[in-house]
Amino acid sequence: MLWRILSKTGLIYCAGAFEAFSAAAFTFVLIAFYGEAIPMGEVPKDGDHYIYVRSNGIHTELILPTDNGTVDWTETIATENFGDNISKEYMVFGWGDKGFYMNTPEWSDLTAKTAGSALLLPTSTAMHVGFEPPPQENKDCVKIQVSKKQYLKIVEYINNSFLERNDEVQLIPGKGYGPNDNFYEAQRSYHLFRTCNTWTSNALKEAGIRTSLFAIFPNAVMGHFRK
C-alpha cells in the first residue's frame, strides 16, 4: 500500500515537473521568437565615432577603439596585466557566465555540466576584455557609426557592467586565454533570459541603436546590420 502511495506521489511530482519544464520552454521560445522580431531604435547613418559588433555564431561582443580622443580605456583597464608584444589599438568587451567563459576557450572544451549550469541556473558573471588589431569587417563583424552622445552611453553601459571595489575593476588573475585578454568580475547574474547577447543588445538599446526588443540569440543583434 505504501509503495503504491509513494509511486503515485512520484508520478504526480514527475508530471508537475514536466509541466513546469514545458511551460518554461514554451515561454523561452515565445520570448526569443517575438522578442527578436520586434525592432527598436535606429540604424545610425553617420557619426563622429564608431564601434564594432561581432559574433562568433553563439556569442556577441563589442569592439571599441582603445583611445579615440573621447575615451581612453587604459584609464580603466590597466595595460600591465596584458602582454607587451600585442596590438592594443582596439579593445573587445563581452559579458557572460563566469564558468562558461573561463572554462571554455574553445567550443571543444565545452562540457555538459558547464553548459547546464549556465543555461539552467542563475550564475555569477565575468567581463571578458581583450586587446587586438583593427577588426576585419564582414557579416559577423559590423562597423557602426555613432554620435559622441551614443558612444558615451555605450561606454557608460560597459563601465557599469564591471564589479568595482574602491573605484577599480577587479581582475580575475590567471584566467585569460592568452597574453591579449583577461577576465574581470562583473555585475548581475547570468541565466536563460539574460545572456551575452542580451548584454550586447542592451548596450545598443541604451544608445538608441537598432536592436531587437529582446535578444537571446546572436541574430537578434547582428540581423539588423548585416547587408
Image (cartoon, grey):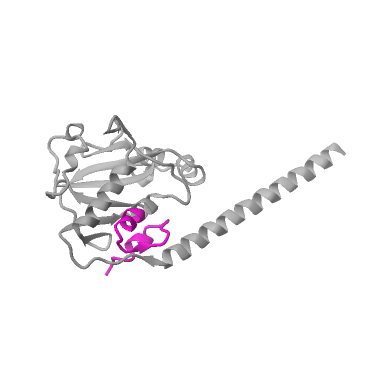
At 26% from the left and 42% from the top, the residue drawn is: 129
At 15% from the left and 49% from the top, the residue drawn is: 70
Residue 164 visible somewhere in the drawing: yes
Q: Is 112 on the left-hand or right-hand side of 12?
A: left
Q: Is residue 88 magenta?
A: no
Q: In the rendered view, would you say 81 is above or below 154?
A: above
Q: Is residue 209 magenta?
A: yes
Residue 219 visible somewhere in the drawing: no
Q: In the rendered view, would you say 126 is above or below 223?
A: above
Q: Position of residue 3 (x, y in %)?
A: 82, 38
Q: Which residues are magenta?
A: 201-227
The quadrant of the rendering that contains the N terminus is: top right
Q: Position of residue 72 (x, y in %)?
A: 16, 43
Residue 190 is drawn in which quadrant? Answer: top left
Q: Position of residue 47 (x, y in %)?
A: 17, 62
Q: Position of residue 147 (x, y in %)?
A: 20, 59
**Total number of numbered discs in the rendering:** 0
* Residue at far bottom of view: 227
- In the depicted view, which residue is nearer to us: 67 or 20? 67
